[in-house]
Image (cartoon, grey):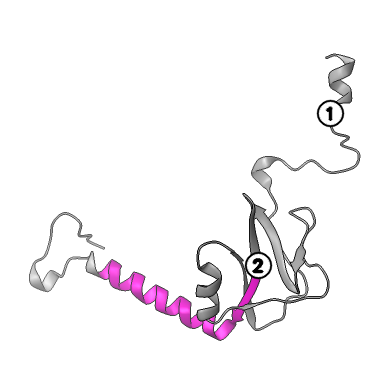
Amino acid sequence: MSAERATNRPDRSKSTRVPLGNRARLSFNNLEEGYVYRVINDVDDRIKRAEAAGYEFVESESSLGETRVADASKMGAKVSKPVGGGMTGYLMRIKKDWYDEDQKAKQARIDDTESAMKPDKKQNQYGEGLTNS
């Protein structure tokens, strides 16, 4: 290896190498109990849909988050992070009770779909697309 190539290498003594497959997840500190938090990307109408569902922006005077992932920044007092591709994700939260209600409703829809795929033995149903479990 030439001396020129060696001088272009990053100085590993200043930071710890993180392999691409082991990327740190976004994380935030000082989260209030009783809420479920999500980073919601500002794309299409996701922010408006989240607000309509009961999510609210998390606001802070100080930056939140792990600097190893990306430096947290604020537009106004809303906590945000760059999430890649020029897109910004905003930290939002919803009351845990509402989140749990939403999850139960989602699971009920999944259960209905799965039960429709199972044969009704009383009606002698069988065939492609039906499961026996």
* Percent coordinates x, y for residue 40 in the rendering: 59, 66
Magenta stretch, overall SS = helix
**Dot 2, crowdedness within 10 Å: few (<14), some or many (≥20)?**
many
From the viewer's perspective, is residue 84 above or below residue 53? above
Region of the chain picked out in magenta, as a range: 90-115
**Dot 1, crowdedness within 10 Å: few (<14), some or many (≥20)?**
few
Residue 109 located within the stretch drawn in magenta: yes
> Do the numbered discs 1 and 2 sit on residues whose CB atoms are within 8 Å?
no
From the viewer's perspective, is residue 14 above or below residue 6? below
Q: Outermost residue, left direction?
A: 124
* Percent coordinates x, y for residue 103 in the rendering: 47, 76
Viewer-proximal residue, 3 or 43?
A: 43
Q: Quadrant of the N terminus?
A: top right
Residue ID at (26%, 70%): 115
* Numbered label attached to residue 68: none
Q: Amino acid at mark 2?
A: Tyr
Viewer-proximal residue, 31 or 59?
A: 59
Residue 72 located within the stretch drawn in magenta: no
Q: Secondary structure at mark 2?
A: strand
Q: Is residue 63 left or right of residue 96?
A: right
Nearer to us of marks 1 and 2 is 2
Q: Which residue is mark 1?
A: 9
Viewer-proximal residue, 125 or 92?
A: 92
Q: Is residue 26 visible?
A: no
Q: Amino acid at mark 1?
A: Arg
Q: Secondary structure at mark 1?
A: loop
Q: Quadrant of the C terminus?
A: bottom left
Q: Which residue is mark 2?
A: 90
Residue ID at (90%, 42%): 14
* Percent coordinates x, y for residue 36 in the rendering: 61, 76
Mark closer to the chain start, 1 or 2? 1
